Amino acid sequence: MISLIKFYQNKNITKTKIIFTVLLIGQFFIPQILGQNNFAYAASYVYVNGYPTLNGNFVDCDGNIDADPSHHTTNPNDTDPGHHLGQNCPAGSLLNSAAPTLIVQPLSPPTAPAPNSNPGPASPNAYVYINGYLTLNGNFLDCNGSIDNDSSHHTTNPNDTDPGHHLGQNCSGGSLSAQLPVSTPALPANNPLPSASSLTSNIFSAMPMFVDPNNQASVYANSIRSWDPSNASLIDKIGNQPQADWFGDWNTDVQSDVDNVVTAASNQGTLPLLVAYNIPQRDCGGYSAGSTSAAAYQAWIRAFAAGIGQRQAAVILEPDATALITCLSGSELQSRYNLLQDAVNVLKANNHTAVYIDAGHPAWISAAVMAQRLQQAGINQADGFALNVSNFYSATDNISYGQQLSAALGGKHFVIDTSRSGNGPTPDAQWCNPLGRALGPAPTANTGNSLVDAFLWVKTPGSSDGQCNGGPAAGVFWPNYAEALVNSANW
């Protein structure tokens, strides 16, 4: 029920093994001495679902090889340095020195390809294996390193040796894939995803929020300003406010598009608000439906995170993903939770990214049920949750609901979308372009409640929810609706 926000001006994972290896091209080893046992290494520490490994072997916190499966703990409170949950290793140990939030330390570059083979794009970026498929910056590659998004080539046949297909271990000798490491250690049963900690302070209070000059309202206002200055000025009331930039399957290069927004915000010393909206079976086939696969989503969220890098950003993660689940089977629901957990951890590996998992609105799912869903979606590793995205409930109603959720989640903070909450919902709680609504409180970190990190405009006021109540397609800016929101606002 969340409308797509498209930039017209710019533009199953299972509960089995999730194996990925990251290769950073163009970086060479400088042997280092790390860990309490002070040994030198010229290899790669790879985290596989939270467990540190070296050259295919599990290692303890001191870097010693240890294949004892009883040490592959899933207990987050286990602080035994001989066990393998990296975030619990003591200060000064190998894993702390090697920065446990990283997926992998730098590897040596691959050897030169065989004559006449295509080494693929020359890039310092990351080649990532996802369920056996070779990807680069969110794009599937064939064995020669060329981008190929033909889904028929994403073979699952272990006997398929066609080098144009994407099962890396079957690529022919001399190809790019044959040069990259494809073997990874087996995963222990019931393994956890890598852990990540929340930011220790409210990121929204640290700097002003970014006003994207290319937001839909500003683009429209500028297009009519010369011949309709009065209405342009009216729409400016929306365009001059900080609001979210949305990213999904309409972005052909999500890493570049995210980077453009974050760079613009960073140059201004402001905080960008980004929405990741690309989860498989998005919107359960509604106005904002999407068809991304689980494997493609993992690649996409990594490209999204790469676009942020180590710069300041706040992310609203997958509107509706925990509330709108009626179309999902049991295995599909578990896949969704796994993907959300993975996304939280990938994003939180960037030290200055705040992540808020969407949690619906006060009249949708009970707080007790939503708290359970958020726990399965990785809320413990996130900074908090987001309420009222693209909806109309008042800040007061959302705060009451959010406090109930927070109490069930150990005091987690939350943010509220106030973009269209000025008059509250309609009596019958319409969600798709309801008439008579108004702009809500302007974006601010001064919320008057210590649990509420910010009032935000996650939804762009004036962006259609879909073809209902006379509106255009989801995501299209609707000037008449935008003007009505402004005219009904009490500020």
Image (spheres, helix red, strand yellow):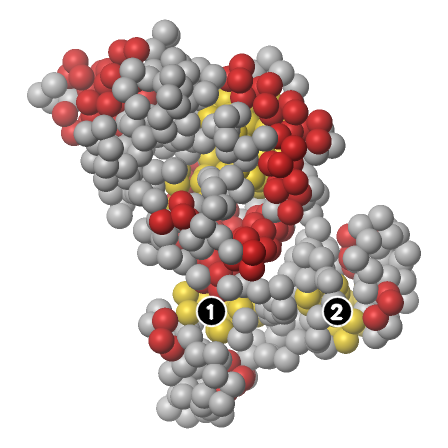
Residue 78 at x, y = what percent?
Answer: 87, 52
Image quarter of the N terminus: top left
Asked if residue 14 is positioned above or below residue 317 in the image, the reply reads below
Query: Tag 1's secondary structure?
Result: strand
What is the distance, in whole Å, between disc 1 and disc 2 at their CAs? 25 Å
Classify 5 as above or below 445.
Answer: below
Is 347 placed left or right of 472 in the picture? right
Q: Which residue does the image show at 74% across and 32% down from the upper left?
A: 410
Taking the spot 27% from the left edge, 45% from the top edge, the residue there is 10
Q: What amino acid is labelled 2 in the image?
A: Pro
Q: What's the residue type where badge 1 is placed?
A: Thr
In this rendering, position of residue 47 left or right of residue 366: right
The percent position of residue 28, horizontal first and vertical second, equals 62, 71
Tell me what residue is drawn at x 24 percent, y 23 percent: 481
Give the image quarter of residue 56.
bottom right
Label total for image: 2
In what element is the residue under mark 2? Answer: loop
Is 51 placed above or below 349 here?
below
- Where residue 155 appears, x then y in whole percent? 44, 79
The residue identified by callout 1 is 135
Residue at figure coordinates x 59%, y 79% from the top left: 182
In the picture, the disc for residue 188 is 2
Out of 126 and 159, give the one closest to the viewer: 159
